[in-house]
């Protein structure tokens, strides 16, 4: 076990992440209503749910507007995910956006916020709010966010890629310092291997991010500080490889590459920390968007996300050590051939 | 001792440039002809973001052109001679200071030529004092950053081509923040808004200079 337990750990963690992360269902949610506008009087509509179980037990359904509730006069499940609803909408709702809520014992409380534009506004409706049940949903599932929907699982793959890349770049930085201290070619090989591996994870991060952006924001690439940061990072390390390629003498190459790596790494880190604060971003936690940790209150995402981060980082370090050992063997065999 | 050495090296740079007058002339001509080519392409620009972006792109290329020669104009023998005379940190500090001063002048000169040809309409509603501070800070920042990159490229024995490859990615953070700051100054924002960006720019400049000072001795020796 000595020396390789962490490799086993990374495999086990990633197995857990793939199985639990892809197999856990999304929580039930209301995703669509057949009409966009309600006005005072009788209103009929169909509401569409996702991962709901309306057939098992017809839910209680109500409208909510600024804390005031109006219960449905008729609720008829058409299928597990379709509900036929009838409301008597009163005069005098205060807000021009009304949300739709539902509760049943299987799915818990689910809501479609800002579901309807509302007509006939006033200073509040006259009759009492109706009584409803309200209880959290039982069981383990991921939050069902609008726009994100099923793609929320990408959190366990896209985000850890960047953490892994940063870890590997820090390893490369450390070895570059070592090169300057001792002129050690072995350390130079380690730095190069770490940069290679980090570029692999950068590419994976870009691919997973691009697919995610297409699914949620509607474009493969958006002008976003995080994306600019990622692009600059990839360019910097591309330049690092080109610099290495243009110096034939190994000792000089080691030193020049180490200097560029240290220079670029420090500037890049300062940049990555400050840039998101200079401009707005679509990413969670920037530009007024809530961070993931803020709306992930049931912590089901965290139960997979933290193991995913640790698992991917260990996996990345493993990839780096393999690459480094291969490079070392290659250079040893080159030396033997030269002799 | 150190300061005397740096002053001496600064004087050496100054004398070298005075002796090779074409160096200054080529820098000025490069900027003016770039601006003139842009002028032939776009005539007058009235849109603030485009005006601003084009100005910084021109200045960036001017900086690359001006600083490439910083470490490439002397051959290996002269470098070795300099190495025996002065400490490497004095050399890099003197060159950085000298390049910073050159770029401060060059950026103001570029601005004047740019305003003349491409038009100064976007500067009418601007906070001119802040804008000038940003232009000079940005120009000096390019100089600080590219001095070390120029030394690296010269050491790698691969001229301006390598300098562009190495320089562009690491100059991007500075370019983005300087464009943002100058855009705000052109929009007429006061110190309360632009202050934090200018401060951030100065901070990058200082970090860059510190890194150059720390790393240069390793670059110098062979």
Image (tube, helix red, strand yellow):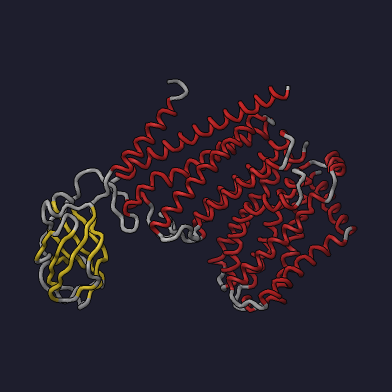
Q: Quadrant of residue B110?
A: bottom right
Residue B115 appears in view: no
Residue at 75% x, 58% y is B65
Q: Quadrant of the C terminus of chain B?
A: top right
Q: Is residue A182 left or right of residue A42?
A: right
Nearer to me, A157 or B92: A157
- Percent coordinates x, y for residue A155 in the rendering: 38, 47
Residue at 68% x, 41% y is A245
- Percent coordinates x, y for residue A14 in the rendering: 39, 36
Q: Quadrant of the N terminus of chain B?
A: top right
- Percent coordinates x, y for residue A177 in the rendering: 63, 36
Q: Is residue B61 left or right of residue B87?
A: left
For residue B220, above or below residue B121: above
Nearer to me, B163 or A120: B163
Residue at 17% x, 58% y is A102
Q: Quadrant of residue B131?
A: bottom right
Looking at this view, name the residue that lies furthest to the front.
A337
- Percent coordinates x, y for residue B93 in the rendering: 75, 48
Residue B111 appears in view: yes
For residue A25, above or below residue A86: above
């Amino acid at each position: 076990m000595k020396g390789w337990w962490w490799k086993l750990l990374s495999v086990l963690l990633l197995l857990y992440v793939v199985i639990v992360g892809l197999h856990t269902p999304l929580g039930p949610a209301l995703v669509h209503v057949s009409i966009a506008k309600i006005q005072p009087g009788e209103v009929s509509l169909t509401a569409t749910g996702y991962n709901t179980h309306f057939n098992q037990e017809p839910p209680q359904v109500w409208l909510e507007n600024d804390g005031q509730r109006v219960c449905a006069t008729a609720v008829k499940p058409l299928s597990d995910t379709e509900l036929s609803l009838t409301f008597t909408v009163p005069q005098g709702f205060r807000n021009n956006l009304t949300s739709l809520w539902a509760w049943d014992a299987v799915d818990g409380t689910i809501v479609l916020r800002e579901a309807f534009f509302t007509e006939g506004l006033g200073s509040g409706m006259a009759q009492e709010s109706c009584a409803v049940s309200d209880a959290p949903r039982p069981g383990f599932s991921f939050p069902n966010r609008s726009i994100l929907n099923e793609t929320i699982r990408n959190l366990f793959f896209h985000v850890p890629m960047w953490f892994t890349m940063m870890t590997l770049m820090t390893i490369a930085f450390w070895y570059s310092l070592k090169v300057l201290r001792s002129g050690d070619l072995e350390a130079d090989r380690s730095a190069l291997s770490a940069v290679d591996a980090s570029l692999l994870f950068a590419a994976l991060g870009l691919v997973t991010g691009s697919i995610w952006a297409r699914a949620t924001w509607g474009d493969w690439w958006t002008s976003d500080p995080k994306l600019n940061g990622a692009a600059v990072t990839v360019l910097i390390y591309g330049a690092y490889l080109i610099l290495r390629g243009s110096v034939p003498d190994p000792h000089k190459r080691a030193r020049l590459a180490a200097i560029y790596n240290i220079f670029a790494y420090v500037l890049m880190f300062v940049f990555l920390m400050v840039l998101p604060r200079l401009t707005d971003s679509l990413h969670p936690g920037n530009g007024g968007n809530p961070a993931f940790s803020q709306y992930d209150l049931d912590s089901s995402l965290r139960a997979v996300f933290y193991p995913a981060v640790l698992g991917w980082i260990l996996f990345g370090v493993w990839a780096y050590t393999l690459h480094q050992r291969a490079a070392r063997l290659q250079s040893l065999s080159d030396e033997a051939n030269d002799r | 001792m150190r300061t005397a050495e740096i002053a001496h090296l600064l004087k050496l740079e100054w004398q070298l440039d005075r002796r090779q007058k074409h160096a200054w002339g080529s820098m000025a001509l490069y900027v003016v002809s770039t601006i003139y080519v842009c002028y032939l392409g776009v005539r007058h620009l009235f849109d603030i973001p485009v005006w601003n972006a084009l100005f910084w792109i021109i200045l960036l290329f001017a900086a690359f052109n001006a600083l490439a020669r910083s470490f490439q104009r002397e051959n290996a023998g002269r470098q070795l001679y300099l190495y025996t005379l002065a400490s490497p940190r004095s050399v890099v500090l003197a060159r950085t200071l000298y390049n910073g001063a050159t770029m401060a002048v060059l950026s103001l000169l570029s601005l004047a030529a740019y305003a003349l040809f491409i038009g100064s309409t976007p500067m009418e509603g601007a906070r001119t004092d802040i804008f000038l501070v940003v232009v000079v800070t940005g120009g000096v920042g390019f100089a600080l950053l590219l001095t070390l990159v120029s030394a690296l490229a010269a050491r790698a024995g691969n001229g301006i081509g390598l300098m562009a490859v190495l320089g562009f990615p690491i100059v991007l953070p500075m370019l983005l923040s300087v464009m943002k700051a100058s855009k705000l100054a052109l929009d007429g924002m006061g110190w309360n808004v632009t202050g934090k960006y200018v401060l951030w720019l100065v901070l990058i400049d200082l970090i860059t200079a510190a890194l150059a000072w720390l790393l240069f001795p390793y670059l110098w020796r062979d």
